[in-house]
Image (cartoon, rainbow, N blue to C red):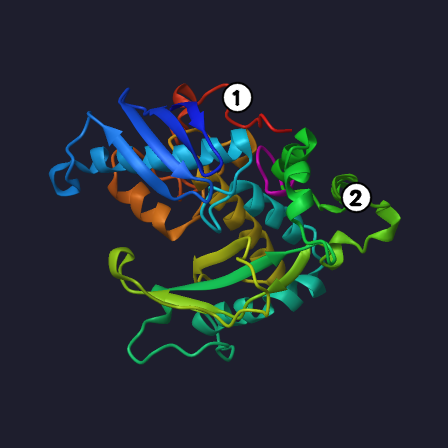
């Protein structure tokens, strides 16, 4: 993928995108991410006349355009819950939690899973006839840092090079998962530096420093193309959540094991943000496992992708050959 911003005004941005098939896409979008123009000559105009690969090249070009404008200009062009920086901020928030703190925020979800694969009481009622093992359970995460929220600090937090190393160590990339305690001072120092605060004035990350609120459990059932979604009750916040756990139930033998799986799931979502835009994720995010449900379907059905959702599958390509050398750096920092 290659992106070149060719024009910009107070309403939006025009960008030329060369996809991984070498086709030029001329795309215009508002600063909120809405695509207003898309022209290309490499694929049929009608989606029904394209191959699976052709349709996905079109989709990748639009995802990449939104990502590139966000990364290079800092505009909020990415869809809610499809911003890898915000998802990784959720990883920073959730990974260090104590067992008690994790149970406070995610205990209802763990109990729901145990009701499917154990004898716990369900925490959410499903419509009659819906198989609990074929249901995706969803829980939204709202990040914040006191009254100022996380917005002002998020970009600075995620621009710290050592943060990716900490995330890689936390989620078992290239070795056994560490205890985590040794990384907590560095996590907190990064947050303090980004928000301009004294580290000693901040509550511990282990107690939920970065978590403003979480939603009640929502559910999604049916096929990916025709799913029924019942949103969970949301907290009284006038903004979109920063991340969402969206996972089928599985047999989690303990709360600590469930904690690890939730963190890995969020990292896999950040991974998916890059792959679905046709570029490689940073090396610390190259783990196998389920991320977005939408991505799982694409990885299984579309020849452009491999089965990144399966930790047991050996991956032959992460799209390194299609990734610009400055894919992870901002022009605004």
Image height of 212 relative to 280, above or below: below
Q: Which of the two residues, 220 or 331, is positioned nearer the viewer here? A: 331
**Residue range (magenta):** 170-176
Could you tell me how far apart the alpha carbons at marks 2 and 1 are, in whole angstroms?
27 Å
Quickly name the residue at label 1: 326
Image height of 24 relative to 135, above or below: above
Residue 218 in picture, x, y percent from top left: 45, 68
SS for callout 2? helix
Q: At 70% from the left edge and 63% from the top edge, which residue is drawn?
A: 101
Quickly name the residue at label 2: 192
Q: Is residue 95 magenta?
A: no
User: How many C-alpha atoms fall within 10 Å of the one at disc 2: few (<14), some, or many (≥20)?
Assistant: some
Q: At 43% from the left edge and 42% from the top edge, which residue is drawn?
A: 33
SS for callout 1? loop
Left or right placement of residue 58 versus residue 179 in this view: left
Q: Is residue 28 among what the camera can see?
A: yes
User: How many C-alpha atoms fall within 10 Å of the one at disc 1: few (<14), some, or many (≥20)?
Assistant: few
Residue 257 in picture, x, y percent from top left: 58, 56
Look at the image and tell me in which quarter the C terminus lies. Answer: top right
Left or right placement of residue 174 versus residue 128 in this view: right
Q: Earlier in the sequence, mark 2 or mark 1?
A: 2
Q: Is residue 252 among what the camera can see?
A: no
Residue 86 in picture, x, y percent from top left: 57, 46
Residue 175 in picture, x, y percent from top left: 60, 35
Image height of 117 relative to 322, above or below: below
Q: Is residue 173 magenta?
A: yes
Q: At 25% from the left edge and 39% from the top edge, which residue is drawn?
A: 302
Q: Residue furthest front?
A: 10
Circle count: 2
Q: At 54% from the left edge and 28% from the top edge, which residue is drawn?
A: 328
């Amino acid at each position: 993928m290659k992106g070149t911003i060719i024009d910009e005004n107070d309403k939006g941005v025009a960008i030329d995108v060369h996809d991984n098939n070498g086709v030029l896409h001329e795309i215009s979008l508002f600063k909120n991410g809405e695509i207003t123009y898309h022209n290309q000559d490499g694929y049929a105009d009608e989606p029904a006349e394209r191959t699976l690969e052709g349709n996905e090249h079109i989709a990748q070009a639009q995802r990449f355009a939104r990502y590139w404008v966000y990364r290079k200009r800092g505009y909020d062009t990415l869809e809610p819950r499809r911003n890898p920086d915000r998802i990784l901020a959720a990883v920073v928030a959730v990974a260090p939690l104590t067992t008690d703190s994790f149970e406070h925020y995610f205990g209802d979800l763990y109990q729901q899973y145990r009701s499917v694969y154990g004898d716990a009481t369900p925490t959410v009622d499903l419509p009659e006839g819906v198989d609990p093992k074929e249901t995706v359970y969803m829980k939204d995460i709202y990040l914040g840092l006191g009254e100022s929220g996380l917005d002002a600090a998020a970009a600075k937090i995620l621009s710290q090079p050592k943060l990716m190393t900490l995330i890689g160590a936390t989620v078992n990339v290239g070795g056994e998962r560490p205890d985590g305690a040794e990384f907590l001072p560095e996590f907190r120092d990064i947050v303090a530096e980004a928000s301009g605060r004294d580290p000693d004035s901040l509550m511990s990350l282990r107690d939920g420093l970065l978590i403003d609120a979480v939603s009640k459990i929502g559910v999604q059932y049916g096929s990916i193309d025709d799913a029924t979604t019942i949103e969970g009750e949301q907290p009284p916040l006038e903004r979109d959540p920063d991340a969402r756990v969206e996972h089928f139930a599985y047999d989690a033998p303990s709360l600590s094991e469930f904690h690890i799986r939730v963190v890995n799931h969020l990292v896999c979502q950040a991974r998916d943000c890059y792959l679905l835009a046709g570029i490689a994720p940073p090396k610390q995010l190259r783990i196998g496992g389920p991320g977005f449900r939408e991505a799982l379907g694409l990885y299984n059905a579309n020849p452009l992708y491999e089965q990144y959702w399966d930790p047991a599958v050996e991956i032959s390509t992460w799209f390194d050959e299609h990734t610009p050398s400055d894919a992870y750096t901002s022009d605004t920092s």
